[in-house]
Image (tube, rainbow, N blue to C red):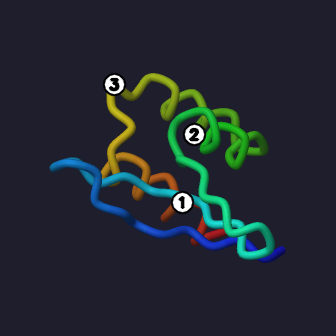
């Protein structure tokens, strides 16, 4: 797959980025990307989309759900 998730400081807020190791590009992992990753879990996806923030602490909860599968 060649992708990795990395935590990067942005101002004083921390966020997640997906790193494409083949191209060297990085992509913000917010609600939109996370919703795609959770498409097989509609109940969890719904909770995600109701979140007000896209910060690392919020996204980390949903990454943990994916990691436990």
Helix, strand, or loop for circle 1? helix
- Sequence-wise first label, 1 or 3: 3
What quarter of the picture does the C terminus occupy? bottom right
In the image, 17 versus 46, the foreground residue is: 17
Determine which residue is flagged by label 3. 52
Front position among marks 1 and 3: 3
Question: Label 1 neighbourhood size at 10 Å, few (<14), some (14-19), many (20+)?
Answer: few
Q: In the displayed structure, would residue 37 be above or below residue 4?
A: above
Q: Position of residue 45 (x, y in %)?
A: 61, 35
Determine which residue is flagged by label 1. 65
Give the distance between the C-alpha atoms of the residues marked 2 and 3, in whole angstroms: 15 Å
Q: Position of residue 28 (x, y in %)?
A: 53, 47
Write the residue at 78% across / 76% down: 2
Write the residue at 43% across / 50% down: 59
Residue contact between numbered discs 1 and 2, judged by CB atoms under 8 Å: yes
Question: Label 3 neighbourhood size at 10 Å, few (<14), some (14-19), many (20+)?
Answer: few
- Sequence-wise first label, 2 or 3: 2
- Sequence-wise first label, 1 or 2: 2
Write the residue at 41% across / 58% down: 60
What quarter of the picture does the N terminus occupy? bottom right
Helix, strand, or loop for circle 3? loop
Give the distance between the C-alpha atoms of the residues marked 1 and 3, in whole angstroms: 19 Å
Residue most extreme to the left: 12
Residue 17 bears which disc, if any? none
Give the distance between the C-alpha atoms of the residues marked 1 and 2, in whole angstroms: 9 Å
Residue contact between numbered discs 2 and 3, judged by CB atoms under 8 Å: no
Residue 13 falls left or right of residue 64: left
Q: Position of residue 3 (x, y in %)?
A: 71, 71
Helix, strand, or loop for circle 2? helix
């Amino acid at each position: 797959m060649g992708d990795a998730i990395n935590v990067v400081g942005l101002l004083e807020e921390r966020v997640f980025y997906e790193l494409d190791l083949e191209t060297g590009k990085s992509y913000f992992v917010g609600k939109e990307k996370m919703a795609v990753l959770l498409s097989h879990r509609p109940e969890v996806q719904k909770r995600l989309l109701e979140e007000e923030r896209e910060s690392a602490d919020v996204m980390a909860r949903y990454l943990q759900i994916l990691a436990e599968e």
